[in-house]
Amino acid sequence: MKKNEQNMQGNLASISGAMPEAGAVGSGTPRKCGMTRRSLVAGAASAVMALALLAGCGATPKATDAGSAPKTAEDTSAAATSKLIVGFDQAYPPYGYVGDDGEYTGFDLDLAKAVAEKLDWEVELEPIDWEAKDALMDSGAINCIWNGFTMEGREDDYTFSDPYMLNAQVIVVRADDGIAAQADLAGKTVVTQIDSAAEEVLEGDAADLAATFASLETIGEYNTAFMQLESGAVDAVACDLSIARYQMSAKPDAYLMLDEYLSEENYAVGFKKGDTATAKKVAEALKKLYKDGTVEQIAAKYADQGLTMDNWQIK
């Protein structure tokens, strides 16, 4: 079989050698082809036979793209599928957490359900590892992030709805620790959630302040951070204003929030970059839900956890 293969490969080489060279077409200088129409047809037939025999000898010709439709990425957006798949941190009260009944609950999750109902969409709540949110969004496992999600600094990575809630990054300390201002944090240990807006601020605009700390540590979720603060393992927690209010509502005598904000920002619903259709529909639905009183009714459920309508943005 080896000898036959060599002969056939020689035939193919002689045929290809008689064809115009790559790049000759459109080069500005016409080239004469030494083959007649009949010899071209005959050569093509020989080539087909040679390829068929080569296939029988175990050689597999490369597949071509001719005639095959290009693959397009599946559109997993809620606007296309009528299904809102909400990625959220299940330890982020009052926005998303596990309730006493074992069910997922929270202000943002209730908002997502209300929006889905308004738009006649299905809704699916998906608790996620916060560090994996980008990969989950890219894969289509979720099609939005709705969980006290700060939009500032992430505009290049996501398409956002209109901002719906004003927020700030703050510092919380133990009430009896004698820390009254940011300057008192020098030499102290501060903890924040990994990949959070607070971490971004302390590594960016507030880096000079962070440089005075003994250390800036990160942790997976804020409930554990506040347990560490209460036990004395750390001296302060950097977090969202809403998280601080929630923790302080549960233990008002245990914690003190410093008056100085690290930054001010906005919460918005994050979608895959370019998904403007879903972002627009969600923002429009939130506006309608505010006007008919639904948003205020939902917020009232979490008032005892420090959530207020004072900072609501979409009206």
Image (cartoon, grey):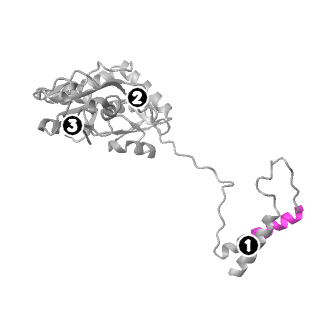
Quarter of the image for residue 169 reads top left
Q: Which residue is mark 1?
A: 9
The answer, for residue 141, to whether it is visible in the render is: no
Q: Secondary structure at mark 3?
A: loop
Residue 32, percent from left and from top: 88, 57
Quarter of the image for residue 235 reads top left
Q: Nearer the viewer, residue 26 or 66?
A: 26
Instruction: Give the CA distance from mark 1 to mark 2.
Output: 67 Å
Q: Nearer the viewer, mark 3 or mark 1?
A: 3
Instruction: Give the CA distance from mark 3 to mark 2.
Output: 50 Å
Q: Secondary structure at mark 2?
A: helix
Question: Counting other residues with Cα less than 10 Å from the Cα at mark 1, is it few (<14), some (14-19), or many (20 or more)?
Answer: some
Q: Secondary structure at mark 1?
A: helix
Q: Is residue 291 left or right of residue 104?
A: right
Q: Which residue is mark 2?
A: 118
Residue 193, percent from left and from top: 27, 38
Question: Residue at position x 26%, y 21% from top?
Answer: 308
Dot 3 or dot 2, earlier in sequence: 2
Question: Residue at position x 36%, y 45% from top?
Answer: 132
For the residue marked with disc 2, what is the amino acid? Lys
Q: Which residues are magenta?
A: 35-50
Residue 282, percent from left and from top: 43, 29
Q: Nearer the viewer, mark 3 or mark 2?
A: 3
